[in-house]
Amino acid sequence: MSAETDVLIVGGSVAAIRAAEAISRHAPAVRVTMVSDEPHLPYERPPLSKTALDGTLDLSALTYPSVAGLREHGVEFVTDTRVTSLDVESRTVSTTAGDITYGAAILATGCEPIFPPMFRQLPDVFVLRRFQDAVALRAAVADRRKSVAVIGAGFIGGEFAATLATVGRPVTIVDLATKPLGRFGDPVASEYAALHRDSGVTLVLGDAVTGVEDAEPGRVLRLASGATVPADVILLGIGVRPSTGWMENSGLTLDNGVVCDSTLRAADGVYAAGDVVTWPNGRFGATMRIEHWTNAAEQGRAAGINAANAVTGLAPIDCVTVPYFWSDQHGVRIQFSGFLRGDEEIIECPGPGGSLYLYAGGDTLHGVLAFERRAEFVKIRAMLRRETTVGAARDILSVGA
Ligand SMILES: Cc1cc2nc3c(=O)[nH]c(=O)nc-3n(C[C@H](O)[C@H](O)[C@H](O)COP(=O)(O)OP(=O)(O)OC[C@H]3O[C@@H](n4cnc5c(N)ncnc54)[C@H](O)[C@@H]3O)c2cc1C
């Protein structure tokens, strides 16, 4: 590992790789070192919850195709090495393999799953964030006699439950909320719940897990209502938090992630990208932190250009994005784009093949969510790059708007 570099990237996932790609294109002479605590080269996470159980998770197929070219170009990939602290003044990080000084740094340490203490000492309880998590979880459910419970009806839990249901495995999702994906409004919550129930998933909503008990046979979750749920294997899908613990003495502002300006700058010579970032997004005039792949990729590119510019003396660019995510469950693609304040009017737009919802703030379109309406969704998503009206979005819908 080099003790000195031009741009140091901390993290080894999508934001990190997009940053390295941007630097190699934008400023090929700039030296880049990427340090990740994972034992693997950067790989795609989304397939970890979606790959069919009778298929295989192939790490080499998941590894970003650009890694080989970046290596040839001279990017140094340091794996299995944790960055433990950052000194902004001396532009130095400490790692488990020694110190590195940098010209500019990009912090792309993402998020880590929440793992409440009540589950920590128990066998066969999993989170799903890293490749090894997925390998261990899939090994645990390989025995078809084992019951599976998912705690949390969000995307990770929903996707893994769908993966099980697709091969006919019984699975129960338990969620404290009465409305899954409730932030997208009642009609979306109802449709999401129906999608799972119609596909064979048992959904227990509005009930809290109070304990885990041995039963005959196997193990169960005890719920606040007194009900029990078979749970030989448990997947915790109850959310993530920004991986900022290692930055605590750095002097950076940490508040729901690393607080950055519109150029993703956190301090002199320090940029950040991906799930770990809170920043003012000029497109929506709002400060936000996003936990989705596309945002991490877009921010990685912007932070890469800005870190290279900091080294070469050029001006930074603003990072302006339109948040987007997709999720694949039971053969249905769920997509959202936009930014919701929570007080929008929800307009249901029935149409062929699936459903589509527009989120209106007066005449202004704030967002769009679709269940398997890919072609129309793509068009409305593109319109959201600029402020647009609800009427303009309705005009492109084929039926029923
Ligand atoms: C199973 C799964 C499925 C998903 N599916 C979708 C999907 O369908 N659609 C969608 O939009 N989004 C999806 N996401 C979310 C998406 O993958 C994340 O938004 C994205 O990975 C965020 O990228 P990131 O680079 O910011 O951070 P992360 O992916 O969290 O990566 C952070 C990296 O930093 C490393 N790191 C952390 N701390 C340190 C340290 N101190 N020192 C060194 N290295 C460190 C980590 O090991 C990791 O390599 C999914 C996520 C998961 C886990």
Image (cartoon, helix red, strand yellow):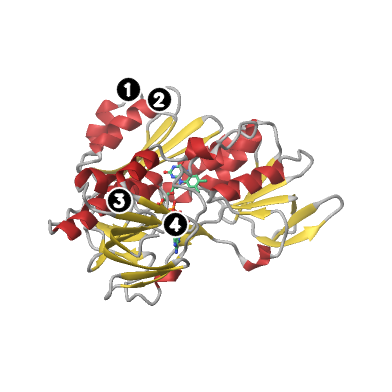
58 or 147, nearer to the observer: 58
Q: Rounded to the nearest whole Å, what is the CA distance between mark 4 and mark 1?
A: 47 Å
Task: Tell me if 93 is positioned left or right of 233 in this view.
Answer: left
Query: On the rendered image, what quadrant is the C terminus found in?
Result: top left
Question: Ligand 1: does it lie within 8 Å of the C-beta at label 3?
Answer: yes
Q: Earlier in the sequence, mark 2 or mark 3?
A: 3
Q: In what element is the residue under mark 2?
A: loop
Q: Is residue 266 visible?
A: yes
**Residue placed under numbered mark 3 in the picture:** 299
Give the residue displayed 27% in from the left and 26% down from the top: 396
Question: Ligand 1: does it lie within 8 Å of the C-beta at label 2?
Answer: no
Question: Ligand 1: does it lie within 8 Å of the C-beta at label 4?
Answer: yes
Q: In what element is the residue under mark 3?
A: helix
Dots 4, 1 in contact, CB < 8 A: no
Q: Rounded to the nearest whole Å, what is the CA distance between mark 2 and mark 1?
A: 7 Å
Q: Which mark is residue 398?
A: 1
Task: Tell me if 128 is positioned left or right of 201 in this view.
Answer: left
User: Marks 2 and 3: which is nearer the front?
Assistant: 3
